[in-house]
Image (tube, rainbow, N blue to C red):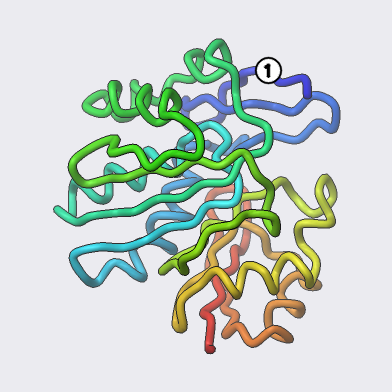
């Protein structure tokens, strides 16, 4: 997988997967997109108590985890964060990202997120525990369910198998009753599959450059 660091419109960096011309975040702003989709319209909707659990499909640059850590500190809450990533970044790649300019108080924590041992629960901060697994969606062996699932896989045109019914059923099984799936994707077929599986699907305004995004509440 050939990857290159790029700058997005809000000044924050991302990566581009050169083999298929796919970016890890929106070119209209990496930090802006992740905060809008996964924090404001994801974690924020389930964080009504002293703790929350997050399952992420696609650790990638670690940006969603970093913003979740910021949210945990700001809300004085505990977050248990599990992330799946079959293609981890190298130290050279993640150290070239500039997120410390946007969250300077969490520079050390960003390093800790990437340096945390795989397949091991690591307390990155008193408010945040991380478990990273070198696995793909549908293959993990986690014996728990989660409050919210960040579905941040590559777009359907790049990884169509991750947006089809078997994986989406697996997603439902990873969520608690009333749990929330959140994603940047607004594809019609994807939404229809979620509805067929029993999700209460809603379209929300997307981040800059994208008209809509999707959330789905697990009704079971």
Residue at the spot x=84%, y=50% of the render?
157
Residue 102 as seen in the image, left or right of residue 189: left
As rendered, which of 63 and 1 lies closer to the eye? 1
* Left or right: 191 in relation to 205: right
- Residue 86, picture quadrant: top right
Position of 53 relative to 117 (above/below) = below
**33 relative position to 26: left or right:** left
Image location of residue 22, percent across then percent down: 75, 35
Q: Residue at x 64, y 87 (%)?
A: 198
Identify which residue is drawn at 42% across, 58% down. Answer: 54
In the current view of this chain or complex, which residue is farthest to the top? 92
Quadrant location, the N terminus: top right
Asked if 197 appears above or below 78 in the picture, the reply is below
The residue positioned 42% from the left and 23% from the top of the image is: 115
- Identify the image quadrant of residue 194: bottom right
Numbered circles on residues, count:
1
Residue 76 x/y as whole percent: 14, 53
Element under disc 1: strand
Frontmost residue, 79 versus 188: 79
Q: Residues within 10 Å of mark 1 (few under 14, many from 20)?
A: few
Q: Position of residue 140 (x, y in %)?
A: 62, 54
- The residue that mark 1 highlights is 4
The reply, left or right, for residue 86 in relation to residue 113 is: right
């Amino acid at each position: 997988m050939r990857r290159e660091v790029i700058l997005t419109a809000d000044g924050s960096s991302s990566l581009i997967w050169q083999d298929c011309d796919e970016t890890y975040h929106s070119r209209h702003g990496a930090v802006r997109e992740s905060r809008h989709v996964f924090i404001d319209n994801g974690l924020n909707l389930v964080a009504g108590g002293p703790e929350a659990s997050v399952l992420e499909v696609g650790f990638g640059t670690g940006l969603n985890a970093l913003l979740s850590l910021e949210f945990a500190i700001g809300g004085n809450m505990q977050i248990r964060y599990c992330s799946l990533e079959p293609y981890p970044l190298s130290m050279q790649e993640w150290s070239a990202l500039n997120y410390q300019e946007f969250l300077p108080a969490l520079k050390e924590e960003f390093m800790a997120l990437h340096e945390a041992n795989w397949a091991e629960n690591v307390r990155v901060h008193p408010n945040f525990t991380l478990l990273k697994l070198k696995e793909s969606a549908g293959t993990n062996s986690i014996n728990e369910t989660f409050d919210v699932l960040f579905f941040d896989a590559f777009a359907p045109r790049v990884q169509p198998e991750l947006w089809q019914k078997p994986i989406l059923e697996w997603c439902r099984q990873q969520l608690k009753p009333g749990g929330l799936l959140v994603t940047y994707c607004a594809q019609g077929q994807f939404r229809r599959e979620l509805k067929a599986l029993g999700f209460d699907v809603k379209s929300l305004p997307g981040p800059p450059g994208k008209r809509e995004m999707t959330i789905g509440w697990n009704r079971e």
